[in-house]
Amino acid sequence: MRAVVLTQYGGPEVLKVSEAPDPVPGPEEIVIEVEAAGINRADLHQREGRYPPPPPAPPVEIPGLECAGTVVACGERVVEFSVGQRVAALLPGGGYAERVAVHQRLAWEVPAAQSWVEAGSTPEAYLTAYDALFDKAGLAMGQRVVIHAAAGGVGSAAVQLATAAGVRVLATAGSDEKVAWTRQLGAEVGVNYRTQDFAEAVREWTGGVGVDAVIDFVGGPYWQANCDSLKPGGTLVLVGTLGGARAEVRLGQLLQSRLTVRGTALRSRPLELKMALVQQFRQRVVPLLGSRFNPRIDRVFWWEEVAEAHRYMETNQNLGKIALAIRRTALD
């Protein structure tokens, strides 16, 4: 098969489509003929050599944490799927390829209302958002949350999931256009972090009480403002550290305000925990995909243009997801 194989690390120019071994399914795995794959910020880190795949190391290193396509082979103990079904899957890697093998419990049948590109852009983004909002932060109807980087793939998914659950959202983004877009997704308040102080906006929005949770992708530079934005007993969920991984922590504030800080990452979790999350998501959210929820697709690149797709993500211009079309039928 053909795939984007990382033979060296570096800039987008290292990304090239080349030959790779065909995947062989394990006893409980399915092989998917990939139609489309979503691009995630983690893919950029892997390309740079800063986000290695979890062990055991694959024979060849292929980026891609999510995809959608058709089942073309099943392992001997597969009971969830059969050849010919349309599926989407959360992957430990390998999505930038014509075919990929994945455990059956990390996949679900694609709803009829979803296109290939939408389905392939769902798993990593929506599972990360779902986990951060409802497992790590434990949010419920009527509570309030700050969602940073709300115009990105995971952030926009989080805005949709939160508002659908009756959670009130203050979204931050890096331009007035992006802020307006997050309001269209359902955010009650939007803040341009380049021109506004989001912690001050939280104080105004909550009457000085603070929010129940903050979902953060930025890390170090936002640490203190995030803590200041939380109400007593609130939860900070760290999903990424795009701005830096170090911060000066005021331990007294954590104690006095009884704050909880939780980190989350999907790729490094044991398979059993990933499967549990996927099955919960499969029951609660998948039936609503394509109708109540759907990734907002900013741009679709043919996978031969994968280097240009990564360059585009690095500009931070996108509103929602960037996707790769692996087969021409992905846009039918």
Image (cartoon, rainbow, N blue to C red):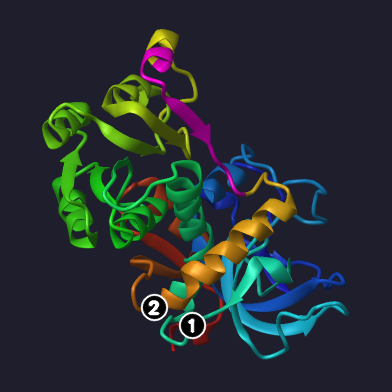
Give residue 171's position: percent from left, percent from top.
25, 45
Which residue is more in the foreground, 146 or 38?
A: 146
**Which quarter of the rendering shows the N terminus?**
bottom right
Which residue is more in the foreground, 122 or 235?
A: 235
* Extent of the magenta region: 254-266
**Which quarter of the rendering shows the C terminus?**
bottom left
Q: Are marks 2 and 1 in contact (CB under 8 Å)?
A: yes
Q: Is 190 placed left or right of 294 in the picture?
A: left
Among numbered discs 2 and 1, the one appearing first in the sequence: 1
Query: To which residue does mark 1 refer?
Result: 111
Amino acid type at circle 2 is Gly
Q: Residues within 10 Å of mark 1 (few under 14, many from 20)?
A: some
x 47%, y 28%: residue: 261
Is 11 rendered above or below residue 123?
A: above
Query: To which residue does mark 2 refer?
Result: 290
Q: Is residue 322 visible?
A: yes
Rendered image quadrant of residue 80: bottom right
Q: Distance from label 2 to label 1 (Cα)? A: 7 Å
Q: Is residue 64 visible?
A: no
Give residue 137's position: percent from left, percent from top.
44, 41
Counting the numbered discs, the total is: 2
Is 201 rendered above or below residue 155?
A: above
x 39%, y 56%: residue: 153
Q: Is 126 placed left or right of 103 in the picture?
A: left
Amino acid type at circle 1 is Pro
Give residue 10's position: percent from left, percent from top.
59, 41
Rendered image quadrant of residue 242: top left
Q: Is residue 265 magenta?
A: yes
Is 165 rendered above or below residue 145?
A: below
x 64%, y 87%: residue: 85
- Dot 1 falls on a residue whose secondary structure is loop
Q: Residues within 10 Å of mark 2 (few under 14, many from 20)?
A: some
